[in-house]
Amino acid sequence: MIPEFRAWTRAAGLVTALLAAACGEPQREPGVASGDTIRTVPTNAPATAREAFWENLTLHCGNAYPGGLVLEPPGDDMLTGTEQLIVHFRECGRDTLWVPFHIEIEATGEWDRSRTWMFMRTADALELRHDHRHEDGSPDEQTMYGALTRDDGSANRQEFIIADRTAQDGSEIGWRVEVEPGQRYTYGTIRGGEWTWRVDFDLARPIDTPPAPWGH
């Protein structure tokens, strides 16, 4: 090949590569043919485990799932363990998720729709609140209590530790929420890092969505 033509060819190739890069064309690895699949690096991955957890919750928006009691301490009679429970990822805002928790009343066949879990995100934490209502929609005497996360947690687990209260033995108390997309959603209370009360929901079994919770 004529030296001047070889030099011109190399220069033209360099210009073509620079133009492709400027136009956003992905660069192939050496040896990758034009018809081969080009591997790219995702640019929209969650920046933190906390954000990944939020995304894992929102994956189920609009769906409802059945569940049941897993753990209840002695003397706690809120649930019998045989009633049906339903979680409904009902409303998903940019920074707030409304997740009602419906409880079957076995004696009457009716439902207690008084509880809604509210997840909120701020710049540096996630917050869990409990919206409790009477059937007429008025707030319960105990409502909107909750706590913030204190660390980044993980994509599948977040703990909301109460800042100004501890158990009688001095242990930290709060709530733990776990989500395995398409598999399991778990909510419960913890003391000293251990479950004290827990309900699980089967995210592999979507069911008909229930009526709105009381007050909503």
Image (cartoon, grey):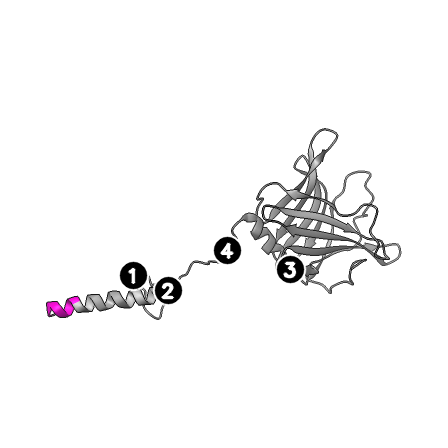
The reply to whether dot 4 and dot 2 touch (C-beta < 8 Å) is: no
**Relative side of 12 to 150, left or right:** left
Identify the residue at horizontal 50%, vertical 58% (top origin). Answer: 44
According to the picture, the residue beneath numbered tag 4 turns out to be 45
Amino acid tagged 4 = Ala
Residue 16 in the image: above or below residue 102: below
Residue 159 position in % (x across, y down): 64, 43
Seen from the viewer's position, the closer of residues 43 and 81 is 43
> How far is mark 2 from mark 1, CA to CA?
13 Å
Q: From this viewpoint, is residue 174 visible?
A: yes
Q: Nearer the viewer, mark 3 or mark 2?
A: 2
How packed is label 2: few (under 14 Cα within 10 Å), some, or many (20 or more)?
Answer: few
Q: Earlier in the sequence, mark 3 or mark 4?
A: 4
> How far is mark 3 from mark 4, CA to CA?
18 Å
Is residue 112 part of the magenta span, yes or no? no
Q: Earlier in the sequence, mark 1 or mark 4?
A: 1
According to the picture, the residue beneath numbered tag 2 turns out to be 26
In which quadrant will I find the C terminus? Answer: bottom right
Residue stretch in magenta: 2-7
The reply to whether dot 3 and dot 4 touch (C-beta < 8 Å) is: no
- Mark seen at residue 30: 1
Q: Earlier in the sequence, mark 1 or mark 3?
A: 1
Q: Outermost residue, left direction?
A: 2
